[in-house]
Image (cartoon, grey):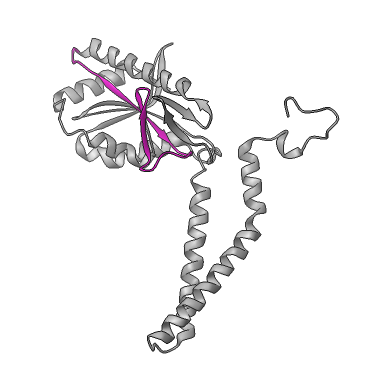
């Protein structure tokens, strides 16, 4: 590791592999501990189910104990699996833009919104999704950080753990401004664009969203809801179609 002493043998955990690789390795190695913990919880569930069955005079109390144990084990397994699956984008096992694009189309398509994926202005900016609909226009990007990275705001600034987040926020704000300028110029329709960042892994504040430094960071499942919360219609069907056709023509696919 950088700055380490030449007289002290370095721990192999800190050399040669990515955090994602080690995360998966430790997860696999911890499987036995998780099984032991699950068995203990299931045993407690069995006792609770058995005692409750006796308390209410139910027949076959042992059967109720087994059902309670199975339910506890299943819930515990699901919680563990969901925690691991939530890191899939960060680990490179899934693509964030595919997940968010699917969510946007499923939630917004029936409400008159159009979603264009992977668009760019040559030598200026690129984004994962451009959303155009009655409530306005949005650019949506996707990012992922390690599961223990706290995403927060202090003094009006964005932080990822102990690191400033301006390098993440500023390009997305710039992309939104560049796209808005292009669409306004080419269509004659005044466009302002709100930048959103779908966070696939990392610790957002309670509620799953955060607005700071000109962007809104939120969980992917909340992006479409945030867009639909715009109550005042800005564009009619003809303007939406004009903006979407112009964006498809003028913006490069990436």
Residue 129: give x, y in percent of width and height.
36, 28
Q: Quadrant of residue 117?
A: top left
Q: Quadrant of residue 219?
A: top left
Question: What's the residue at 74%, 25% (across, down)?
Answer: 3
Question: What's the residue at 16%, 22% (across, down)?
Answer: 239
Residue 143: give x, y in percent of width and height.
46, 32
Question: What's the residue at 64%, 54% (across, down)?
Answer: 30
Whether residue 39 sits left or right of residue 10 in the image: it is left
Position of the N terminus, as image quadrant, is top right
Check if residue 198 falls in the magenta segment: yes
Residue 97: give x, y in percent of width and height.
42, 34
Count of number-bearing discs = 0
Magenta residues span 188-215
**Relative to the observer, which residue lies in front, 174 or 158?**
158
Check if residue 176 falls in the magenta segment: no
Q: Quadrant of residue 137?
A: top left
Residue 140: give x, y in percent of width and height.
36, 29
Q: Indicate whether 252 appears above or below 221.
A: above
Q: List the single residue furthest toward the front.
A: 155
Q: Indicate whether 49 appears above or below 213.
A: below
Question: What's the residue at 58%, 69% (across, down)?
Answer: 40
Position of the C terminus, as image quadrant, is top left
């Amino acid at each position: 590791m950088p700055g380490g002493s030449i007289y002290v043998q370095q721990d192999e955990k800190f050399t040669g592999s990515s955090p994602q690789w080690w995360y998966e390795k430790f997860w696999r190695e911890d499987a036995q501990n998780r099984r032991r913990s699950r068995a203990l919880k299931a045993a407690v569930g069995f006792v609770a189910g058995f005692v409750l069955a006796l308390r209410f005079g139910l027949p076959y109390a042992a059967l109720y104990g087994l059902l309670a144990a199975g339910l506890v084990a299943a819930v515990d397994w699901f919680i563990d699996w969901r925690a691991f699956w939530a890191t899939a984008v960060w680990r490179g096992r899934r693509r964030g833009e595919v997940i968010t694009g699917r969510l946007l189309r499923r939630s917004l398509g029936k409400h008159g919104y159009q979603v264009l994926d992977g668009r760019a202005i040559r030598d200026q900016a690129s984004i994962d999704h451009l959303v155009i609909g009655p409530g306005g226009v949005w650019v949506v990007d996707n990012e992922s950080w390690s599961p223990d990275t706290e995403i927060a705001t202090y003094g009006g600034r964005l932080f990822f753990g102990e690191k400033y987040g301006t390098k993440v926020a500023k390009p997305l704000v710039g992309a939104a401004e560049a796209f808005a300028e292009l669409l306004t110029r080419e269509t004659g329709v005044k466009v302002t664009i709100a930048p959103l960042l779908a966070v696939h892994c990392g610790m957002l504040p309670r509620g799953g969203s955060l607005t700071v430094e000109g962007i809104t960071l939120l969980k992917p499942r909340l992006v479409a809801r945030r867009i639909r919360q715009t109550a005042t219609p800005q564009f009619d069907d003809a303007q939406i179609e004009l903006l979407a056709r112009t964006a498809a023509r003028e913006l490069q696919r990436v």
